[in-house]
Amino acid sequence: MSTKQSPRTPTEPRDLNAPFFKIPEVAWLLGVSVDTVRRRIRAGLLPCSQAVEGGTITVSRADLDAYHEATRLVALPKRHTRRRPARAAA
């Protein structure tokens, strides 16, 4: 007996070089939940397309790469501060 996977479960894409990805595949690629991907699409942060009204929502590889680049965290350079000499004990 097979079990049905929840539509909210991120799934690994069959082809990582595909031109378009479904929402669960995008969630897996970004390491977030399916609901998070839907919220980011609704907020206009992640562009998507839909072939027909009520059809499958897809995200293009180019849009996914642009989103990833825009939200990438970059480490700030370390500030060198001078250490103050320790106070003498009174």
Image (spheres, grey):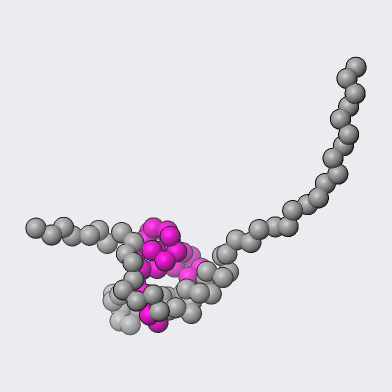
Residue 34, x across and y down, in percent: 36, 61
Q: Residue furthest top?
A: 90
Quarter of the view holding residue 9: bottom left
- Lateral position of residue 47 relative to residue 14, left or right: right
The part of the chain drawn in magenta is: 18-46
Res 6 → quadrant: bottom left
Q: Is residue 3 left or right of residue 75?
A: left
Which residue is located at x 90 percent, y 17 percent?
Answer: 90
x 56%, y 70%: residue: 69
Nearer to me, 80 or 40: 80
Does the magenta portion include 19? yes
Q: Position of residue 80 (x, y in %)?
A: 81, 50
Residue 82 in sight: yes
Above or below 86: residue 49: below
| Residue 52 spot, x, y in % from top left | 30, 81
Residue 3 inside the magenta-drawn segment: no
Q: Residue 14's spot in the image, x, y percent?
A: 31, 73
Is residue 42 in view from this perspective? no
Relative to 50, say whether 35 is above or below: above
The quadrant in which the N terminus is found is: bottom left
Indicate the quadrant where residue 28 lies: bottom left
